[in-house]
């Protein structure tokens, strides 16, 4: 008799991708208010890249199972959970724990995936889609006819963000390496080579009066240029510190530095505003509101995916057991879209 076992990828400490460990064990059972999900797709994001370096803000102590989000089928429901969820495909933001064949989650955190959307397609739109949607519509609130600058327009978040903006009638300037420019132009994005050394000058040529919003995942000292490119009344949304990915030392310092700059800029009487976006903001003290907003926004993202307003960009689908290979590929900077792990 064959027994189903749980397979998980463990991050034991600060290691190279090849240091990830594959563990096997019994499939867990869901408790009260919980679901057991058989994972069908989970992603490799910038968060996991930072976690393996010990540089992701508020990551758990080593060892732990990484995996920021996942998509899968509900296989069991704990006490107090409606049985009609059994057999349905759902998406969940987990922050950690997604890199496993079977995952127990709180039922209230699961959002149903529409029929016709594959697991890999849905996976590209979970944390990336929520981040893009909330930054564009809840933080920046740019009107049709406005202009925005999206750094990393070919990346996981950036590629969804530019499509959501274009669908809203917003002009998009996007930074990316030249190999991605043709794809961006086909979407309707005005591409700028981030390696040219004159990004601010080029953006000012394209938007002499400034841009209505800048979405910046790079951080570092370049965030100052993003602030200076804003038009009067414009909004800067910072959501990462990719520039410091390979730095040594505290992983909290780059975030704290960004928060300090945001506070200072918002104190200036110039009509512009700055935000540091954290997709988990509000969960600790307003969990029900957080969940309702996430459910609403992810439903909107999935609807945009169904309508074709955004397209799922799967860079590669790689088996969970080859997580090291997937991590290397995601960190290579050579892919467009999201690297997805599958069972």
Image (cartoon, rainbow, N blue to C red):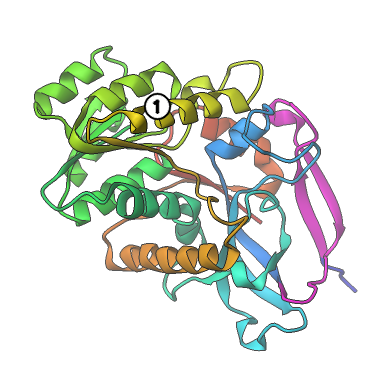
Along the line of sight, the residue nearer the viewer: 207 or 283 = 283
Residue shown at 60% from the left, 33% from the top: 49
Along the line of sight, the residue nearer the viewer: 294 or 328 = 294
In the rendering, at what x and y percent does residue 64 appear? 77, 43
| Res 144 seen here | yes
Residues drawn in magenta: 5-34
Residue shown at 16% from the left, 44% from the top: 188
The residue sitting at the right extreme is: 1
Q: Quadrant of residue 248?
A: top right
Q: Quadrant of residue 301?
A: bottom left
Quadrant location, the C terminus: bottom right
Placement of 263 over or under 33, stated as above or below: above
Q: How dense is the environment of label 1, judged by Cα within 10 Å: few (below 14), some, or many (20 and up)?
A: few
Whether the magenta-drawn stretch holds residue 151 is answered as no
In the rendering, at what x and y percent does residue 31 appear? 80, 73
Quadrant location, the N terminus: bottom right
Residue shown at 41% from the left, 16% from the top: 221
Residue shown at 50% from the left, 27% from the top: 332
């Amino acid at each position: 008799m064959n027994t189903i076992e749980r397979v998980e990828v463990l991050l034991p400490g600060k290691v190279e991708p090849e240091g990830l460990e594959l563990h096997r064990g019994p499939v867990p059972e869901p408790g009260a208010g919980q679901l057991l999900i058989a994972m069908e797709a989970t992603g490799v994001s910038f968060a996991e890249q930072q976690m393996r370096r010990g540089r992701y803000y508020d990551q758990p102590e080593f060892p732990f199972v990484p995996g920021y989000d996942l998509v899968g089928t509900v296989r069991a429901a704990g006490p107090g959970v409606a049985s009609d969820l059994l057999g349905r495909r759902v998406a969940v933001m987990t922050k950690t724990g997604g890199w496993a064949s079977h995952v127990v989650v709180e039922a209230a955190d699961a959002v149903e995936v529409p029929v016709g959307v594959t697991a890999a397609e849905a996976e590209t739109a979970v944390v990336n889609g929520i981040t893009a949607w909330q930054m564009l519509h809840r933080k920046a609130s740019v009107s049709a006819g406005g202009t925005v600058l999206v750094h990393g327009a070919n990346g996981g978040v950036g590629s969804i963000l530019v499509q959501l903006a274009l669908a809203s009638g917003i002009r998009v300037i996007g930074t990316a390496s030249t190999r991605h420019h043709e794809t961006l132009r086909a979407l309707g994005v005005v591409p700028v080579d981030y390696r040219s050394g004159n990004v601010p000058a080029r953006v000012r040529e394209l938007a002499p009066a400034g841009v209505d919003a800048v979405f910046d995942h790079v951080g570092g000292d370049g965030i100052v240029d993003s602030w200076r490119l804003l038009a009067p009344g414009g909004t800067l949304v910072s959501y990462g510190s990719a520039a410091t990915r390979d730095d040594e030392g505290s992983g909290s310092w780059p975030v704290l530095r960004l928060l300090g700059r945001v506070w200072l800029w918002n104190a200036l009487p110039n009509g512009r505003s700055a935000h540091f976006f954290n997709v988990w903001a509000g969960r600790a003290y307003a969990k029900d509101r957080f969940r309702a907003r996430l459910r609403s926004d992810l439903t909107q993202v999935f609807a945009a995916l169904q309508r074709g307003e955004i397209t799922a960009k799967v860079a590669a689908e790689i088996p969970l057991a080859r997580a090291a290979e997937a991590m290397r590929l995601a960190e290579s900077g050579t892919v467009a879209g999201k690297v997805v792990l599958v069972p």
